[in-house]
Structures are given as structure tokens and as C-alpha cells.
């Protein structure tokens, strides 16, 4: 932010471009202050074939891989806390949450760190031959007998739907 008045807020975006917003619009976006520290929560999905190891072995290995890679890339001094936890058994995958807390010094790298965590998780999957699932859709095909038109008994239809009862006859019956 390079300028703030009661009427406008002027921001310098990454890359150097500037954006001016009415102050009310800026505040309506609920801006997050990253310079005091921040948490990245990244969901990473794995295939159901890893069900036996997803709650203990995989989180341990991913945590170690993340620590090592973040250290190698120079982010270790900014890493405050890191954990990998099993989150849920989803419809097509077993989901893990990566929780990474960083000091405010890493704020300019916020988006880069989010992508780095995903990349490191993929690299760990490749190193351990763990499968990343594709979204799956299951279709149930109806049999021919389920598509045949059903014949309903005569008494199922209300009398106004019968062909031998024109609307005029129904009106006459209703008035008499």
C-alpha cells in the first residue's frame, strides 16, 4: 500500500503495477496482513490404494520431504511450524492437510510457497511411488427392461386425463 485516504487506497502489485480502489471496496475484501506471519493450508490428495499407510507413514514422509526441500530452497529460517495431517476419506481420494506457518519475512513469497508445497508433495509421491488420484465418476447403466415404457393400470389415471372425457364433459359434471 502506497497511499491510503478516507476515499481511496492505492496498492503496488507484484511486478510494479498500481491499483487504486475506493477505501470501502478495499476493506470489503477483508485484506489479510501477511507481514506479521501467515499460515498456508494446502490440501493434497492421494489414491485409496495407500489407505493402510495414509494416517501414519505418509504424513511422516511428507513432513520430512517438505522440511528438506524448504531448507534446500532457503525457506527454513522463515518456517515457524509444519505439519501434515490426515484430513478425510473423500469420494475419490484420501485427503491430507499440509499446515505451514511462516514468519512475515516470507510474505512476498506467499503464492510461491503455496505452489512449492504442492510441487514438493508431488515430488515425494514420485520418490515413494505413491499414486495421485484422478477424479472419478461412477455411472450405473440402466438395463433395457428399466427403459421399457410402463403400462399403468386404468384406475391410476384421473378421469380428467382420459381421452373419452373431453374438458366440456368435466365442466358439466362439476356443475351438476
Image (cartoon, rainbow, N blue to C red):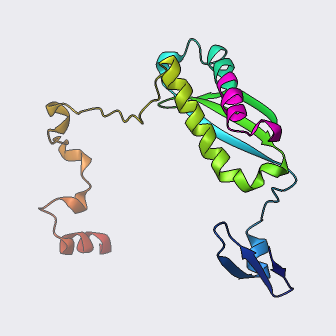
Residue stretch in magenta: 64-79
Residue at 64% in and 76% down: 17
Examine the rendered structure and indicate whether residue 72 appears above or below residue 18. Answer: above
Residue at 63% in and 38% down: 117
Q: Give the camera-side residue of 153 and 132.
A: 132
Query: Which secondary structure type mostly characterizes the magenta part of the structure?
Result: helix
Residue at 47% in and 31% down: 92
Q: Position of residue 5 (x, y in %)?
A: 86, 85
Farthest top residue in view? 52
Q: Position of residue 33 (x, y in %)?
A: 82, 59
Residue at 31% in and 75% down: 175
Farthest left residue in view? 164
Side (left or right) of 86 relative to 5: left
Examine the rendered structure and indicate whether residue 72 appears above or below residue 130. Answer: below
Residue 46 belongs to magenta span: no
Q: Quadrant of the N terminus?
A: bottom right
Q: Quadrant of residue 153?
A: top left
Q: Give the camera-side residue of 56 and 15.
A: 15
Farthest bottom residue in view? 7
Count every numbered label the image shows and give the total: 0
Examine the rendered structure and indicate whether residue 4 appears above or below residue 169. Answer: below
Q: Quadrant of residue 7?
A: bottom right
Q: Position of residue 167 (x, y in %)?
A: 20, 72
Q: Quadrant of the C terminus?
A: bottom left
Side (left or right) of 47 relative to 36: left
Q: Position of residue 115 (x, y in %)?
A: 60, 45
Side (left or right) of 173 relative to 166: right
Amino acid at each position: 500500500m502506497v497511499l491510503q485516504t478516507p476515499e481511496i487506497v492505492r496498492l503496488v502489485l507484484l511486478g510494479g503495477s498500481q491499483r487504486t480502489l475506493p477505501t470501502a471496496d478495499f476493506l470489503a475484501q477483508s485484506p489479510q496482513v501477511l507481514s506479521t506471519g501467515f499460515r498456508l493450508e494446502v490440501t493434497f490428495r492421494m489414491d485409496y490404494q495407500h489407505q493402510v499407510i495414509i494416517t501414519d507413514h505418509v504424513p511422516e514422509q511428507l513432513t520430512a520431504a517438505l522440511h528438506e526441500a524448504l531448507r534446500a530452497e532457503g525457506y527454513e529460517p522463515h518456517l515457524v511450524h509444519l505439519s501434515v495431517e490426515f484430513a478425510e476419506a473423500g469420494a475419490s481420494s484420501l485427503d491430507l492437510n499440509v499446515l505451514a506457518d511462516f514468519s512475515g519475512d516470507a510474505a512476498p513469497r506467499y503464492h510461491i510457497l503455496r505452489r512449492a508445497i504442492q510441487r514438493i508433495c508431488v515430488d515425494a509421491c514420485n520418490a515413494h511411488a505413491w499414486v495421485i488420484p484422478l477424479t472419478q465418476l461412477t455411472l450405473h447403466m440402466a438395463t433395457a427392461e428399466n427403459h421399457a415404457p410402463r403400462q399403468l393400470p386404468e384406475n391410476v389415471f384421473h378421469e380428467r386425463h382420459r381421452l373419452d372425457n373431453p374438458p366440456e364433459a368435466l365442466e358439466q359434471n362439476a356443475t351438476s
